[in-house]
Image (cartoon, rainbow, N blue to C red):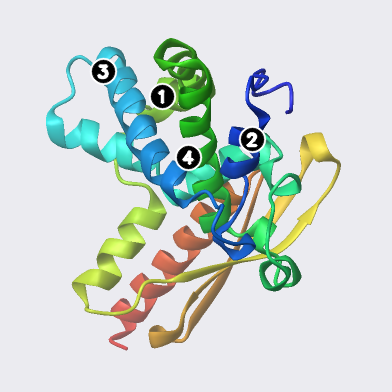
C-alpha cells in the first residue's frame, strides 16, 4: 500500500476483498463498504465534535456531510492511489471505472472496514483520524455552503435534475496536477468548466461559474 496509508494487512485477503468491485463477482466489497461507511461517519463526527465545540448540530452535520461526500472520499482514494489497485470486471475496466468517484469512494470505505476487521478499533480510528486531520482542521474556515451544495439546492428548489460533472483533463506532474472539469445542467442548457489543483476544487470552480450563469439568466428574465 502507499506510504500515505502506512498500514500492512495481517490478512491480505481482506485488502483484496476491499478493493474488489461487484463487477468481479460475488467476492466483492459491497458488505465492507456498508460497514466502512458507518465507521468513517462515526470517526469524522467524533473529530468534528472535538474540533468545533461551539458549532450546533446542524453545522456539524453539514461539515460531516461535506467531508464524507462521495467526491471527498474519492479524492482521498486518489491520494492513496486506490484506482491503480482496484479489481474490476472487464466492462468496468474498459469504461474507466478506476477513475469513477462512486467506485473510488466505495473502495475507500471498504478499505477502512477491512482495516477495522484486520487490526481493531484503535488502529482503524487512528488511520481515519490521520487521513481526515487536514480536512477537519479546515472544514470550518468557510461556514457558508460551498458552490456545489448551493447549486444542488438551487436546482432541487426548482425541481430540476442535479448537475453532471465530467473530468475533461488532468495535466502536469503527479505532485502538481491541474484538473479541468465540466459542469453540465442540461435542463438549463448550461455548460461551464473549472480548473483546480484537485478534481474537487475544479468541480467547485465549475459550479461557481454555473451559479453565475444562472444568476445572469435570472437577471435577464430568461
Which residue occupies 39% across, 53% down?
Answer: 147
The quadrant in which the N terminus is found is: top right
- In this rendering, the label closer to the viewer, 4 or 3: 4
Q: Which residue is denoted by mark 1 in the rendering?
A: 136
Tell me which corner region of the image, top left, top right, bottom left or bottom right, holds residue 4. Answer: top right
The quadrant in which the C terminus is found is: bottom left
Q: Which residue is denoted by mark 4 in the rendering?
A: 109
Q: Which residue is denoted by mark 3 in the rendering?
A: 52
Mark 1 or mark 3, earlier in chain:
3
Which numbered dot is residue 118? none
Which numbered dot is residue 13? 2
- In this rendering, the label closer to the viewer, 3 or 2: 2
Tell me which corner region of the image, top left, top right, bottom left or bottom right, holds residue 21. Answer: bottom right
- Judged from the image, the secondary structure of the residue bearing numbered disc 4 is helix
Residue 220: image location, x then y, percent? 33, 84
Question: Label 1: few (<14), some or many (≥20) within 10 Å?
Answer: many
Which residue occupies 24% across, 19% down?
Answer: 49
Question: Label 3: few (<14), some or many (≥20) within 10 Å?
Answer: some
Mark 3 or mark 2, earlier in chain:
2
Between 97 and 116, which is closer to the camera in this rendering?
A: 116
Q: Would residue 142 be visible to someone looking at this image?
A: no
Amino acid at each position: 500500500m502507499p506510504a500515505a496509508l502506512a498500514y500492512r494487512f495481517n490478512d491480505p485477503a481482506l485488502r483484496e476483498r476491499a478493493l474488489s468491485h461487484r463487477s468481479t463477482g460475488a467476492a466483492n466489497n459491497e458488505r465492507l463498504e456498508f460497514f466502512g461507511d458507518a465507521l468513517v461517519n462515526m470517526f469524522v463526527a467524533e473529530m468534528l465534535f472535538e474540533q468545533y465545540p461551539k458549532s450546533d448540530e446542524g453545522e456539524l452535520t453539514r461539515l460531516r456531510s461535506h467531508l464524507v461526500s462521495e467526491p471527498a472520499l474519492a479524492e482521498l482514494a486518489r491520494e492513496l492511489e486506490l484506482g491503480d489497485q482496484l479489481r474490476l470486471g472487464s466492462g468496468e475496466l474498459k469504461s474507466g471505472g478506476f477513475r469513477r468517484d462512486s467506485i473510488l469512494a466505495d473502495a475507500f470505505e471498504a478499505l477502512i472496514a477491512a482495516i477495522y476487521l484486520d487490526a481493531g478499533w484503535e488502529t482503524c480510528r487512528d488511520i481515519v483520524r490521520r487521513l481526515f486531520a487536514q480536512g477537519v482542521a479546515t472544514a470550518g474556515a468557510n461556514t457558508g455552503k460551498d458552490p456545489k451544495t448551493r447549486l444542488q439546492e438551487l436546482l432541487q428548489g426548482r425541481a430540476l435534475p442535479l448537475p453532471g460533472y465530467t473530468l475533461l483533463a488532468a495535466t502536469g506532474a503527479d505532485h502538481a496536477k491541474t484538473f479541468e472539469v465540466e459542469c453540465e445542467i442540461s435542463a438549463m442548457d448550461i455548460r461551464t468548466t473549472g480548473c483546480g489543483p484537485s478534481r474537487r476544487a475544479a468541480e467547485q470552480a465549475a459550479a461557481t461559474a454555473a451559479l453565475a450563469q444562472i444568476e445572469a439568466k435570472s437577471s435577464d428574465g430568461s
